[in-house]
Image (cartoon, rainbow, N blue to C red):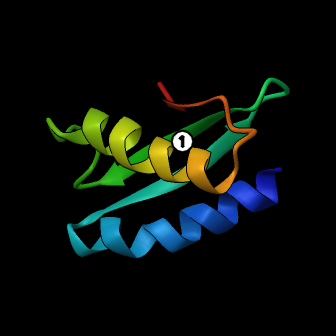
Amino acid sequence: MKDRVQAVLDRIRPSLQADGGDVELISVSDDNIVTVKLTGACAGCPMSQLTLKGGIERILKHEIPEVASVEAAL
């Protein structure tokens, strides 16, 4: 599952990098909760929650239906 999530994140990454940000996969839990860390311009951006839920989570759930949710690393 982790490899599948990483593959999808690798496809999303160029869009984030175009705006000076990036995403790093931290973990995939046993209950399919994906934890990521937004870095670069995405870290601390007021729109980062929208990017996380409306972008990354939406795409991951579409590509990998088993994904329960995507959370930001603290």
Q: Residue at x 60, y 35 (%)?
A: 35
List x then y, in percent, for residue 11. Answer: 53, 73
Is residue 4 positioned above or below 68 on the image?
below
Q: Residue at x 22, y 55 (%)?
A: 41
Please give the residue where the numbered disc 1 appears in the rendered image.
36
Name, please, the residue furthest toward the left. Answer: 46
The amino acid at mark 1 is Val
Which of the 4 quarters of the picture holds residue 67? top right
Q: Nearer the viewer, residue 47 or 69?
A: 69
Q: Residue at x 22, y 37 (%)?
A: 44
Tag 1's secondary structure?
Answer: strand
List x then y, in percent, for residue 52. Answer: 38, 40
Q: Is 4 on the left-hand or right-hand side of 47? A: right
**Disc 1: CA contacts within 10 A as few (<14), some (14-19) or many (>=20):** many
Is residue 45 positioned above or below 25 on the image?
above
Q: Nearer the viewer, residue 26 or 31?
A: 31
Q: Is 2 on the left-hand or right-hand side of 44? A: right
Q: Is 71 on the left-hand or right-hand side of 27? A: left
Q: Residue at x 56, y 61 (%)?
A: 9
